[in-house]
Amino acid sequence: MDNEFRPVYEKLYTSYRSPSEVLLRLRDESFRAARMVSESIENVQDELEERKLPRLREDAKYFLLLNLVEMVYVPLCAQQVPPGCRPLVQDLGFQEDIRTIAYSAARAAANEGQNDISCHRVIDTLPNTWESLISPVTRMWK
């Protein structure tokens, strides 16, 4: 992990002991970012359906949403100096990363005759797609 993010993740982790901190964090920019990530997931979901590939199951969609927002977007915002320099979701490469992960997971699921992609399948796919991801996650989690 990039050492500059260690205190950020520690603060985010301990914030779950105080619901008010979590609720404050998940509003405004973070909420808009979550909505944009969700839209990106649905766009990729539509592509999978059009190509008659296995689709992301609800748990897989939620896993991607939570990880991209809580584990990538929020720490980037917390680490940005000055505070007004919030990264734009559309500039972070999330949609491309979602597409990369989803298509890899869809191929694996299809090879096993499955009609959907579970959260477990997404997790299993990550090592094979890691080097292809373009969002800051590969820098953050060296």
Image: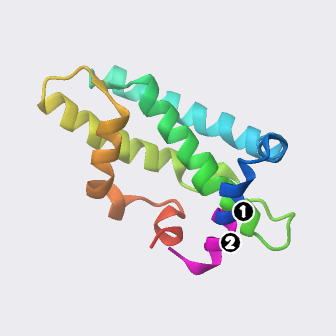
Q: Secondary structure at mark 1?
A: helix
Q: In terms of image quadrants, where is residue 48?
A: top left
Q: Is residue 70 magenta?
A: no
Q: Count numbered badges in the picture.
A: 2
| Residue under numbered circle 1 | 11
Where in the figure is residue 121, as x and y percent of width and height? 29, 38
Do we see residue 44 in this rendering?
no
Q: In terms of image quadrants, where is residue 110?
A: top left
Q: Secondary structure at mark 2?
A: helix
Q: Residue at 68% of width from left, 34% of height from top?
A: 35
Q: Which segment is the magenta one?
A: 1-9
Residue type highlighted by circle 2? Pro
Where in the figure is residue 70, as x and y percent of width and height? 63, 49
| Residue under numbered circle 2 | 7
Where in the figure is residue 25, as x and y percent of width and height? 79, 47
Residue type highlighted by circle 1? Lys
Outermost bottom residue: 3
Q: Is residue 124 left or right of residue 74?
A: left
Where in the figure is residue 61, as x and y percent of width and height? 47, 31
Q: Is residue 6 left or right of residue 106?
A: right
Q: Is residue 31 above or below residue 92?
A: above
